[in-house]
Image (spheres, rainbow, N blue to C red):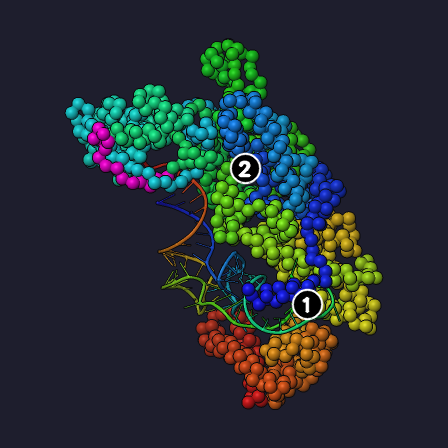
Amino acid sequence: MSAKRARRTAQDAAGAEPRTAPYNPLEVEPRRYQEWLERGHFRAPVDPSRTPFCIMMPLPNITGSLHMGHALNHTIQDLLTRWKRMQGHNAMWLPGTDHASIGTHVVMERELAKAGKTRFDLGREKFLEFAWAWKERYGGLIYSQIRRMGSGCDWDRVTFTMDPGYYDAVIECFLRLYQTGYIYYGKRMINWCPKDLTSVSDLEVHYETVQSSLWYVRYRGADGGPDVVIATQRPETILADVAVAVHPEDARYREMIGRHVIVPIVHRPVPVVADARVDPAFGTGALKITPGHDPTDHAIGADHGLPVLVILDERGRMTAETGRYASMDRFAAREAVAADLEAAGLVERKEPYATNVGLCDRCRTVLEPYITDQWFCRMAELAKPAIEVVRAGRVRFHADRWTDVYLDWMENIRDWNISRRLWWGHRIPVYHCADCRQHAAGRTPPERCQGCGGTRLQQEEQILDTWFSSAAWPFATLGWPQETPDLRYFYPTSVLVTGRDIIFLWVARMIMFGLEFMGDVPFADVYINPTVLNIEGRRMSKSLGTGLDPLDYVEQGYGADAMRYALTLRCSLGQQDLRFGEKMLEDVRHFNNKIWNAARFVRMHLEGFDPAAAPSALGLFDRWILSRYARLVQAVTAALEGYEFDKAARALYDFMWSEFCDWYLELAKVDLYSDGLAPERRQAVQHTLWGVLEGTLRLLHPVMPHITEEIWQELPHRGVSIVVAPWPEAEGAAVDEDAETHTVTIIAVVRAIRSMRADLGLPAAAPLAPMLRADGSARAVLAAHEEYIAALARAPGLTLGDAPSRREGTVGTVAAGVEVALEIADTDRERARKRLAGELSSARADLERAAGRLADGSFVARAPVEIVEEERRREAELRAREQVLVGYLDALR
RNA sequence: GGGCGCUUAGCUCAGAGGAAGAGCGCCUCUCUGACGCAGAGGAGGUCGCAGGUUCAAGUCCUGCAGCGCCCACCA
């Protein structure tokens, strides 16, 4: 146990209680949020007289609950929206959820499985009823969590991707792409999940390295020709082999090309073909060709006019045609076939082999390359303008490095498999003729087939990829394809805030859809927020048990503001990850309490204060803090403009705590507690306390909306809510260099006295009588503010004049050019000597460095004049300081 | 196989060419009238390693190492 903790515990045991209760966010936050809703502060109806600012929320899944990633993502969006609203924009943040077809399927089917059922037991219609009931039950949960975080969304516009209007917009997108000729249909090899029974797009494949085996299998030559040995990790697919391929330049196999070999087990003679896609360095340099079960083989087979054989069904089981392997699972079949090959003496050897297998992103089942009827969207044409707008800076990524990531993917884009063999989603608006297999696209079935005139038309069973529907999010939420006022007013939107994991899945596709359907980019800026990791730097995951629930922390008593601030403080452009730990919340809780109590102090001293009356007697420190505040306004505004959220948060923290509380409040106390304070001085101090606090609250509000509102409402102010208060301009509070310089001097002097007190071991409460000596303007400033220095340094006997720099029985130093001396008792001589010696040695080290640089001819000749001058000034100062310290030290010997 | 990011005080992170910073933690002191979720004073870093550019390098360049991420998917 630390000493500090021990003391605290002892104090607790003694029953010592803090005089005031700390700030309690749990009481404040829900109440304030409710008030904002009731007052309609988050509503943003179309208003042509104001500039719109619009953010579309990256839509959470209906199956999900709020996690740390959302907490950060929403904090940033809310921060931006609130800030822009305060700047006078008509700020709109649109919330919504995603039907997340495969994700929801997985969750619901897991639920069904508990009752021993599958979705096929229910049938399409019943299953969809079940899904809607699910959505009603859980879909609202995430909204209440979003509200609890303080997010100021326009709830009147909340959108679900299967709402009728949105559904219609998605269908419209499909039909237009179909008419343009970008959508095509046919049997293609895709990534198939044998568990979910659907295709998944390339982006939804999760690769993992697993330990597997590589079997070297001998294929006998046909008609007495030479054998060939191939290497495979999937012996079961040998049954579907239609050829063996070798590299055309491979000398080992030149003789083989055009001859035939016998596929083991099925005893099928197949040709040996030459193809440059074979890597001669891998395995034996001979590749078995299985067009039905491997994408590369599929391509090679197509080019060589080879047939396609299929030996696995949609569930990954061996088909009926495979004889004794029929209905075996693919992994069992692998072992069985391998064993049979072994028994036949055809396995040359088997070696361990690490390979990447593609897993279903949702259910982690090993995916199977599989040939089915699929819908694809051509991407080359859509990608072209989407590349151009980013190159031209019409869409800007923050941080900038994501631009290359985006461009790289877009330039190598491949066609998009948009169909899913699932039920929960937007059903593809195409009708197939049962007679001639022709199809036609449309919202309703055609009366008869255009090909054969038949009337047996059936709608396509498959639905669209979830990401196809979310690609329309920036405009389908605003009423597209209707030309609504909303659409005209808010599109293009302002900023997209999202994670890097969906730059391809979502961001790129929104840009392509936006350009295709709206003829304009969907947003001007894309801010990529960091990924939230736990404190060990591990990914948060529910299944690994490393997930953290932000609402847990909020309700534990830290509150939403603390969560928001903790995340914002670490949300920098430089970092791509953000490590989160509970300690961070504690820090912010302390900060909240600091603000709360500072505000209490201010209010306590606002009696008789009239905010409308301009202050007529500002003192040095009033001017100082106003100047510091003016800089703060600039710094915070600039940081937000540059998406440097951490800088904004840090600037606010440092100002509030280290300048406003530690110095200005303490200095103000000297005035406020003095008996004979002139009324105009009181007014000036009150005005400054109020003005700076009120302004800082406004700057803080986007990050910590609740506590700032709670305090702001208790202050004299000009509006109904801080939510709609104007963002501070450096109005009336300009930078005052003079006040800053002089205050720095005074602070340095106070610190010097405090430091001497501590080094000499003098009691904290002992009244001191330091002697100060200064020249010029510093002297005048000190003379005018002796009272403040005396109070803050607890030095009522302070004198300003000719401090003795070589006097027996004193210790001294130089602070900001002011000599500060203190008489010491005989018993303190040793401590004083130690302090002086320490200071002297570090002064000498600095001096040596400065003198060294100035003695270097090339430095003086080549460094810029200002730098050299600065060094000279420093050297002179250090020399003077050294002299003074030596003087004191000598006098103590 | 390609690409990106990170490596600064015990921990979490700022700093991006001119004297090493913050918060927490640690040490000492303080029952001071906003706050002990506090105040005051301290200790603590050859800025991953090796070269280079420069009068000057956490900061720019080149390698290397470790950690993390992304793309591609090789039988």
Amino acid type, residue under disc 2 in the picture = Ile
Proximity of marks 1 and 2: CB atoms separated by less than 8 Å: no
Res A865 seen here: no
Q: Residue at x 73, y 54 (%)?
A: A711
> For the residue labelled by badge 1, is the local secondary structure a helix, a strand or a loop?
helix
Residue hosting label 2: A511
Report x, y in % for residue A85: 69, 46
Residue A178: x and y in percent read 52, 24
Question: Which residue shows up at 69% across the image and 64% down it?
Answer: A16
Question: Which residue appears farthest toward the left when viewing the image?
Answer: A224
Circle on res. A435:
none
Which chain does the numbered disc 2 sit on?
A
Judging by the rendered image, the residue that carries numbered circle 1 is A663
Q: Which residues are magenta?
A: A342-356
> Where is residue A819 shown, x and y percent of the image?
63, 81
Crowd band around label 2 with a 10 angstrom C-alpha radius: few (<14), some (14–19), many (20+): many
Quarter of the view holding residue A620: bottom right
Tell me the residue at 51%/46% (across/down).
Answer: A546
Determine the main secondary structure of the stretch shown in magenta: strand
